[in-house]
Image (cartoon, rainbow, N blue to C red):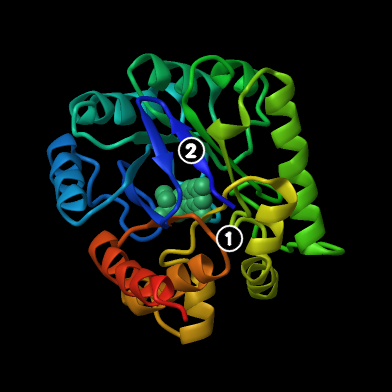
Amino acid sequence: MQYTLECGRFRLPLDRPLVMGILNVTPDSFSDGGRFNAPERAMAHAAQMIADGVDIIDIGGESTRPGSAAQPLDEELRRILPVLQALRDCGKPLSIDTCKPEVMRAALAAGADMINDINGFMADGAVDAVRNGNSGLCIMHMQGDPRTMQAAPRYGDVVAEVAAFLRERRDALEAAGVARTRLCIDPGFGFGKTLAHNLELLKHIGSMQAQLDLPVLAGLSRKSMLGAITGKPVQERLAGSVAAAIAAVARGARIVRVHDVAETVDALKIWQAVNQNNS
Ligand code: HH2
């Protein structure tokens, strides 16, 4: 299936897998908290990601790692807006990772190209905040909330339940007037899921994408499911993260959200070269 993602100032053909680079401007994100929260350091990190071949930059001002607390609105805006403004003309689409409708509105007014909502635009006012214009929208599934989601994730059929949620949110956004070409979906790896749930979802990316007729974005980078498989702490999950990105793309994912852009871009180039020469 050929997809194109409307993404604010950009139209992104998804005929090759795209790399969304993570720019966390938080003091407490699970793998890089505190490293890029000063605006100059965030800018330098963004410049490096661009040099490394990133396709979309995802700016986050609130950590959503398991157990993290929500940020006050003012603080999230204070973290995000200067970086968004400074990067506005960097030539790459800028995504904002937020669940708050007020942050969505402010970010779009300041020129963000995409909104990435781990809460699937469920907050009161979230759909209204994004319905106009042509920003890209990523709808993610999460069971529970970041404070409690890893306590006891439970599903009857994880793939069917995640797909049903994403379908309901797709339909809600479309009913509000959002064109389908603005949407992508994300099963939300690690967001209220055990290792077995995550693996089941990873295996079914292709069928979910076909059923919902929307491109899948997959975020596996450095996550604890990789630690559970390899036994490695968060700083030693580079190889696992690259392998997971390739596994997701091989199952059909069109966008991968990663910390390690250079390594992922190289791995995807190899994967693509081999795939283009299938005989
Ligand atoms: N994962 C994280 C945050 N946002 N958005 C999408 N669409 N998909 C994901 O899998 C996803 C996401 C968590 O990772 P990270 O940003 O590195 O950490 P933190 O939430 O601690 O800032």
Q: Residue 77 sits in which quadrant?
A: top left
The residue where tag 2 is placed is 5
Is 166 displayed left or right of 33 in the figure? right
What element does badge 2 sit on? strand
Cβ(mark 1) to ligand 1 < 8 Å?
Answer: yes
Marker count (numbered): 2
Instruction: Depth check: give the residue in front, 91 or 35.
Output: 91
What element does badge 1 sit on? loop
The residue where tag 1 is placed is 189
Can residue 252 be seen in the rendering of this structure?
Answer: yes
* Residue 219 sits above or below residue 175 on the image: below
**Residue sitting at x 60%, y 54%:** 188
* Residue 170 sits above or below residue 191 on the image: above
Task: Using a 10 Å C-alpha cutoff, classify the residue at mark 1 as few (fewer than 14 neighbours), some (14 to 19) or many (20 or more).
Answer: many
Is 80 displayed left or right of 141 in the figure? left
Is 167 displayed left or right of 56 in the figure? right
Amino acid on which the number 1 mark rests in the picture: Phe
Cβ(mark 2) to ligand 1 < 8 Å?
Answer: no
**Residue sitting at x 38%, y 52%:** 29
**Residue sitting at x 64%, y 62%:** 205
Mark pair 1, 2: CA separation: 21 Å
* In the image, farthest residue toward the right: 156
Q: State the image coordinates of residue 131 (x, y, percent, origin top left).
A: 59, 18
